[in-house]
Image (spheres, rainbow, N blue to C red):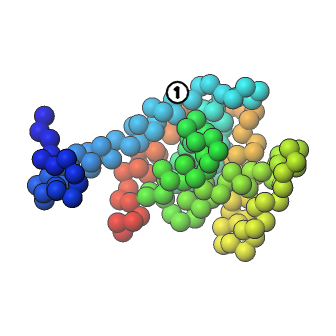
């Protein structure tokens, strides 16, 4: 297989970068497939929860779908905790970074901040500040994030909930991740 000529990026040629750009575009076009494959493997859970990470995500997305949310928000609900496995201390920011090029500023902000907003439901039980989210009270997406947590996240740990299967959401994920990135618009 052909390879670039450089060992240091600063010594790369235009031809090298055109060659890499082609491969990077092809790789990026398969992001949805990689995300869906990763999601399908989230069948384990943190000890103590009644549902797997995948089931929590499916419940969140199903609730968003049933509530008539936009395709973008349904996909965001599906992927909102994708960072739990690899970035448990900042899972919200991780998920938001994955979504950022393909979703609106509003959706990105909601996903990025949902972890802090979720603390409302439990932080006081652990000696923390359940009202940590109040520092964002004047932000234009403050109430939207409260609504996301209330409607789609905090209530999606129910082993008796009938969620839609991951296959149902595949076309939506592929559609959102095939968009031209917002940064290029």
Residue drawn at x 62%, y 25% is 44
9 displayed left or right of 15: right
The part of the image, by quadrant, that contains residue 43 is top right
Residue drawn at x 69%, y 47% is 152
136 displayed left or right of 127: left
Q: Which is more toward the observer, 94 or 184?
A: 94
Can you see residue 159? no
Quadrant in which the N terminus appears: top left
Can you see residue 9? yes
What residue did someone put label 1 on?
A: 41
Q: Residue 74, image x and y in percent?
A: 57, 49
25 displayed left or right of 17: right
Q: Residue 23, image x and y in percent?
A: 22, 45
Q: Residue 80, image x and y in percent?
A: 59, 47
Residue drawn at x 63%, y 33% is 53
Quadrant in which the C terminus appears: bottom left
Q: How many marks?
A: 1
Q: Which is more toward the observer, 106 or 124?
A: 124
Q: Which is more toward the observer, 88 or 74?
A: 88
Classify mark 1: residues with Cα within 10 Å, few (<14), some (14-19) or many (20+). Answer: few
Which residue reaches farthest bottom?
Answer: 138
Q: Which is more toward the observer, 110 or 21?
A: 21
Residue drawn at x 52%, y 27% is 41
Q: Residue 105, image x and y in percent?
A: 53, 65
Classify mark 1: helix, strand or loop.
Answer: loop
């Amino acid at each position: 297989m052909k390879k670039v000529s450089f060992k240091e990026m600063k010594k790369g040629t235009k031809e090298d970068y055109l060659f890499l750009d082609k491969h990077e575009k092809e790789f990026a076009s398969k992001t949805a497939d990689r995300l869906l494959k990763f999601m399908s493997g989230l069948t384990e859970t943190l000890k103590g929860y009644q549902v797997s990470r995948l089931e929590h995500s499916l419940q969140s997305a199903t609730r968003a779908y049933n509530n008539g949310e936009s395709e973008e928000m349904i996909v965001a609900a599906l992927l909102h905790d994708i960072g739990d496995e690899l970035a448990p201390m900042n899972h919200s920011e991780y998920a938001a970074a994955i979504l950022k090029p393909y979703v609106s500023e509003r959706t990105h902000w909601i996903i990025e901040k949902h972890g802090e907003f979720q603390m409302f439901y439990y932080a006081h039980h652990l000696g923390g500040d359940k009202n940590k989210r109040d520092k964002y009270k004047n932000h234009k997406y403050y109430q939207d994030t409260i609504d996301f947590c209330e409607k789609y996240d905090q209530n999606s740990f129910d082993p008796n909930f009938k969620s839609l299967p991951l296959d149902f959401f595949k076309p939506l994920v592929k559609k959102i991740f095939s968009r031209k990135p917002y940064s290029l618009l």
